[in-house]
Image (cartoon, helix red, strand yellow):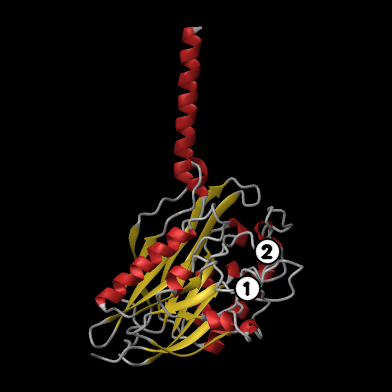
Amino acid sequence: MTRLLRITLLSLLIIAGLLTALIYSLTWRPADKETLPVSCVAPRAPTLLPGQALKVMTWNVQYLAGKNYVFWYDTADGSGPDDRPTVEDMASSLDEVARVIRDEHPDILLLQELDEGAKSSHYQDQVALLQERLVDLYPCSAQAFDWKADFVPNLHIFGSVGRKLVTLSRYQIEHAERLQLPVSPANFISRQFQPRPALLLTYLPLSDGGQLAVLNTRLDGNMPGRSAVQAQAKATVKLLDKFEGRGTPWLIGGDFNLLPLGQFLRLDAVKRGQYSPDSELHLLWDKYPMIPSNSESSGIDREKWLTNFPNDPSVEGPDRTLDYLFYSPRIKRVEAKVRQEDTLRISNHLPVIARFLLPAAQ
């Protein structure tokens, strides 16, 4: 019996070791800080000038899936009927995304949820597909994964995932980094397969020798208690404080998955589950200017500042604000808007667009 027990235990240890090795080979564990390659296809993209105007747009394009679906993750119980969009719908969304970008022509473009090598988007390299349509506008770019695995055992995925943050720029980018944010709590095995939210940090040189720091992100969207979003917000603020302390102008945009002041109670009770009554976003708005501001997103014209149109057949239009731009007080806001009129069928998020004035030379 003792010999049999030893053999059984040894067999279990071997199986556990093989399973651990398999999981590690299929999944991705990025470093806390990584230097990223920067691509500049033009011989020499222009350099930013102190005091110049700068147009910035942030947009979560939902891996070009469009608005014809209710995906499994769109419902609280994971019962949405759709697992992935068709190639035809993604091609249509790609054309529409490119159309809006060309029409707005921002100087800096912050995109979230573009896929590469993911089963759910038919293994497309969506960054390359979009850049083919925008190569004359954006010579410089940087990109970073925030979810990657060769195989995820979830039955709705049951294959590879690869999702990216992408920053495109008309101006020179001299350096880029991926900064890991805190991840959601999970058991050892689940943690290997989950998304790994990050900050995509790019430095754009100024002609006077200074730099503009531009950050792109997408924070957790899980329910309170199952999300690391508060820790992610704290880590983000800590970095922004460092830029302020050094006198480096900065701006950050993305899908923060957090509500502004006053919107929690405006949502139907059944739609509040993933949000906290006291939005963790206050960690940022308490210190730094925000677009849309709380007065805009919860004021009399709040409908103009809604940025999220859920994939929910009971919702007839945008009903909450989740996407924002924050910026250094050294930078001056000139104008801002959410482009709603012709973007409602492209993604479940709408683009936030702002024009700024950079600080003048010292």
How far across and down, in percent of the image, does residue 140 sit? 39, 78
* Label 2 Cα neighbours within 10 Å, binned few <14 / some 14-19 / many ≥20: few
Task: Mark yes or no: residue 3 visible.
Answer: yes
Quadrant position of residue 250: bottom left
* Label 1 Cα neighbours within 10 Å, binned few <14 / some 14-19 / many ≥20: many
Q: Work out which residue is located at the far right of the displayed protein and give it.
A: 314
Mark 2 = which residue? Answer: 271
Mark 1 = which residue? Answer: 320
**Image point (58%, 67%), residue name:** 63
**Image point (42%, 88%), residue name:** 356
Q: Name the one closer to the observer, 120 or 213.
A: 213
Quadrant position of residue 258: bottom right
**Image point (49%, 63%), residue name:** 219
Q: Name the one closer to the observer, 256 or 175.
A: 256
- In the image, residue 199 sits, relative to residue 59, either above or below, namely above
Q: Name the one closer to the observer, 184 or 212.
A: 184
Quadrant position of residue 68: bottom right
Decide if residue 294 is on the left or right side of residue 242: right
How far across and down, in percent of the image, does residue 89 sit? 68, 70
Q: Residue 126 carries which label?
A: none
Decide if residue 25 is on the left or right side of residue 349: left
- In the image, residue 195 sits, relative to residue 60, either above or below, namely above
- Amino acid at pointer 2: Lys
Instruction: Identify the element where label 2 is drawn.
Output: helix
Decide if residue 99 is on the left or right side of residue 71: left
- In the image, residue 41 sits, relative to residue 360, either above or below, namely above
- In the image, residue 165 sits, relative to residue 168, either above or below, namely above
